[in-house]
Amino acid sequence: MTPLLAVENLAKRFGGVRAVDHIGLEIAPGLIYGIIGPNGSGKTTLLGLLSGTYRPTAGSIRLDGQRIDGIAAHRTVAAGIARTFQTTRLFARWTLAETLAIAASAGRARAGAAQAVATALDLTGLAASAGRPCSALSNAEQRFAMIAVALASQPRLLLLDEPAVGMSPTEAGQLGRAIRRIRDTTGITVVIVEHNMHLMMGLADRILAMNAGRRLAEGTPAEIRADPAVIAAYLGH
Amino acid sequence: MTRGGLTYPALCVLGILLFLALQYSNAFYSGIIASILIWTVAVSGLNVVAGLGGYPSLMQGGFYGIGAYASTLALNDGLALPLAILAAIAVAAIAGLLVGLAFARTRGQYFAIGTLFFGVVVNLVLTNGASLTGGPLGLSVPLAFASTADLNIAIAASAAAAMMLVHAIGRSRIGRHLTALREDEDYAEHLGVPTGRMKLLGFTISAGFGGFAGFLIAQYNGAISPDLFNYTVGFVMFVALSLGGAARLAGPLLGSALIVGVPDLLNLPSGAGMLLVGIVFVVVIIIAPDGLIGAAQSLAARLRARPAPAR
């Protein structure tokens, strides 16, 4: 099967820091693809390159065969990539419904915007909160709300940057089930960066382990868990 | 802006009342009302980039000046009135677009400072480009309206139409995108909003309104000179918007009335008038950051929410 996302030789330097150092990866459609690594290993920068937040220093990104590296973030949304952020970002004074509406109308398929909003609310379990201002939602609700907003733009690829931040184990469990439900019902491919290993190991089909901007290992959760290089990076030498 | 169905008819009625006030007051009051209404046009335009988009532009006075000079020069060249109006709007809008490109990557106070300097630059050009602008003495303006009544109609209709247009823009896709940008520009970009293009569009529209207001003030004054378009004008227009209420339909009218009207009515010398405006501005921004209309709305909401007192 042709990969939905194909990344070759991707690099990003901030001054002298090689945040992402020549990474290559391929993600098949419909996969939940995890990225793990110690702090500062380049996970968030990699997501930022995929979502157009940053321009790569070198390398290429192809979505369904189309080059998308270096294009503006709003154009990656049009191409079918939506993302969430590590720190909660929503339009605090807007209601969730208003925020969803703008994502739906600015996104890929303007037709069916109302349906996209309803589906996004349904998949994240937030239908009852649609009329509330985003600032009035609880932390966990805000984390789910960011995912709902991303879904409203009807993406093919959903990028989640530490979605479980600040969640209790119960809430993280709900999050895991929601992400699986999203993939199973819509077929959207999910890339997830997460420090919660319990969540990650139970959720991801494949995992990329990074360290210092480089690829350490890639494989199924069982393979990653048994990989000596990964163990060394996490537990020290 | 919530009871949308009544907004346009209400503004039409307001336009007619404003015309009657302009036409049938004595010269003193009529002059104050005309100044307020012309400012309302410029400040309504500012409402697009600053009110909806959240960009604290201090350069609306520059576009005001550009429009005044562009229309006057066009009339001096023998162009007809509609072409002179077009020149005022187009030259200002193009200037707005270019400045927007130059300031595309600045935000917040850096943006505000940059735009303040644009106002200074416009004033310097008007003062020193003597061969075209007449230098510090300025230009006399060929009057393009057949009668004072016609000019009064144009001014009143322009103020009402400017508020209507900005209201319509606020409810359009452009307006929603601009308000998203105001809330969080980076997040808006990641929701698919083309923030760069929207910002430029906002700048261009705002500048066009400023240019048109410049045309009106030139026609009303009959003469223009650089001191009418001092860099402080843009700053005070921003103060008027903040005072009245940014992103609110009547904010520009209320703010202009307070800024332009009150010092004139009290017949204060211009320095004292500005001092009063400054004090009022500081007080309003501290106790009512959403401007006077915002404060009135939240007060009304609070009164409604409070249960009726027991008798």
Image (cartoon, coloured by chain):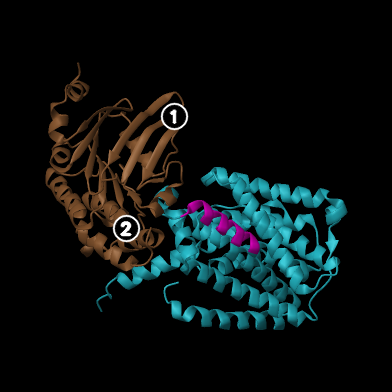
Does B11 sit above or below residue B95?
Answer: below
Location of residue B239 (image quadrant):
bottom right
Seen from the viewer's position, the closer of residues B212 and A58 is A58
Looking at the rendered structure, which numbered label has been put on residue A14? 1
Seen from the viewer's position, the closer of residues A223 and A91 is A223
Establish whether labels 1 and 2 are both on one chain: yes
**Mark 1 belongs to which amino acid?**
Phe
Q: Main secondary structure of the magenta part?
A: helix
Mark earlier in primary sequence (1, 2) = 1
Marks 2 and 1: in contact by CB < 8 Å? no
Location of residue B218 (image quadrant):
bottom right
Element type at mark 1: strand
The chain coloured cyan is B
Q: Position of residue B11 (x, y in %)?
A: 55, 79
Q: CA distance from mark 1 to mark 2?
A: 32 Å
Image mark 1: chain:
A
Is A42 colored magenta in this rendering? Answer: no
**Mark 2 belongs to which amino acid?**
Gln
The chain coloured brown is A
Does B35 sit above or below residue A27?
Answer: below
Mark 2 residue crowding within 10 angstroms, few (<14) / some (14–19) / many (20+): many
Does A3 sit above or below residue A218?
Answer: below
Image point (68%, 75%), residue name: B155
Residue that numbered label 2 is attached to: A154
Is B201 colored magenta in this rendering? Answer: yes
Element type at mark 2: loop
Q: Position of residue B234 (x, y in %)?
A: 65, 55
Looking at the rendered structure, which numbered label has been put on residue A93? none
Does A64 sit above or below residue A234?
Answer: below
Magenta-tinted stretch: B194-208
